[in-house]
Amino acid sequence: METETVPVTWRGRLVRASLDTLVGVAIATGALLSIALFLTTAYFVVLCVIGIGFVALPYCTRAVRWLADLNRRAAARSGVPVERPYRPEPQEVERDIVGWMRTCKWILADPATWRDMLWLLLNCVVGLVGFVPAALLYYVGEGLFLALGLWQPLADDGEGRWYASVTVDSWPAALAAGLLAVVILGAWVLLGPLVLKGYAYFVRYLLGPTRGSRLAIRVQHLAETRSGALDIQAAELRRIERDLHDGAQARLVSLGLQLGAVDRKMAQNPEDTEEARQMLRQARASSVQALRELRDLVRGIHPPVLAERGLADALRALGLASPLGVSVEADLPGRLPDPVESAVYFAVSELLTNALKHADAQTVQVVARYEDGVLHAHVTDDGRGGADLSAGTGLEGIRRRLASFDGVLEIDSPRGGPTVMKLELPCALSSQKTSSS
């Protein structure tokens, strides 16, 4: 499908250039701060030799990484995303001198710490390019003021004002200065984003993760997701065990007792078949109920509609079964791996339940699509909002389930609603499209 190109207006360009100018000034101000942070941190690193520097090193490092993170955000704004390269912090650090020393050792052993120091040193000079858009804008203002007549007091003193390549001492020269100011204004609009993007590449080169830090972050992520997957698996096994114990197992035990009672009854009074038939009918009802509960249990492990029709139709079935007004739009070009489909299915099912029980929602929209090797699913409800991933609710379980597949859960839920849940899972198609959509 062809995409329509949205034209960029000059008003939008001016707004963007103004924001770039403010960001550039912030970057240049940070460059001035860099020299102070570099000298302070280097001073305490040297003092670590005699032990005194360990007292202030964590605080200095926190300030350095705060400034580095601000520059990473500025780089991302220019379209150059920069990941944090720092190695995982030690877990369960003691709140005493031993724990403090472990923290300092972790800081000094991290290569990203020394790359931050090199960035601070170079940023003292390179970061000053952030003043370029502001300087251009100032020069534009100067030219316009000269064109409006500011040159006259200077000319009355017997001196003109040099602007670009023009000596402004008359109205024709002032008009030329105004035209040059307009040209510089165009350069300001076009050059600002280029300056910030060039600086963003500098930031990514020094503040981005190295191969070693990427591996360390990846190992930590895999350890967390493995732990989460094991916890989810253990919880699922406990649920199955509980359902079997409280449901089908109890029914089967009751069935065995009823059949034993029929056997004793027939042995005591072979001619009284009516009561035996009644007891057999009860045993048959128990067997039917046990079979139904086993089917429900299997459906909870892997729903038949998911196995037979795929994720798209399974999501539509969830919408039809929900008491809410659920609309489902699923555009999936084929079947996905079974574990991925199961994870998304139960995640959406949990989100629909939350919308009904906790959000007081009336309508829910579910959108699922597959693009560039990633499955995207959005669940939007018109409830009261306020969903929080850190509240320790079922949302954390959904996040951990998706993290097992390198997936993410993003929540946008302001007070008063609406709530938008975004699920993203990288995966590959396992077969061609089979759903009825």
Image (cartoon, rainbow, N blue to C red):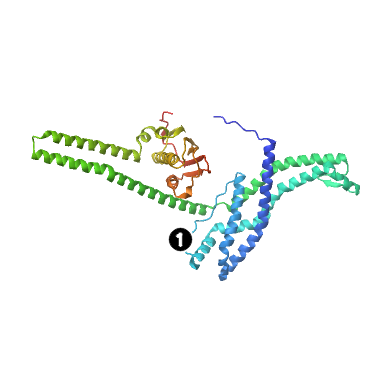
Q: Quadrant of the C terminus?
A: top left
Quadrant of the rendered image containing residue 19:
top right
Which percent across, then down, holds residue 402? 44, 44
* Residue 338 appears in the figure: yes
Q: Quadrant of the N terminus?
A: top right
- Residue 276 vs 70, above or below: the answer is above
**Mark 1: few/some/many CA within 10 Å (<14, 14-19, 20+):** few
Local secondary structure at mark 1: loop
Q: Mark 1 sits on what residue?
A: 92
Along the viewing direction, whichever of 144 and 374 lies nearer the viewer: 144
* Kind of residue at disc 1: Glu
Along the viewing direction, whichever of 148 and 116 lies nearer the viewer: 148
Along the viewing direction, whichever of 68 and 368 lies nearer the viewer: 368
Which percent across, then down, holds residue 423? 47, 41
Along the viewing direction, whichever of 374 and 358 lies nearer the viewer: 358
Residue shown at the point (57%, 49%) measured from the top left: 82
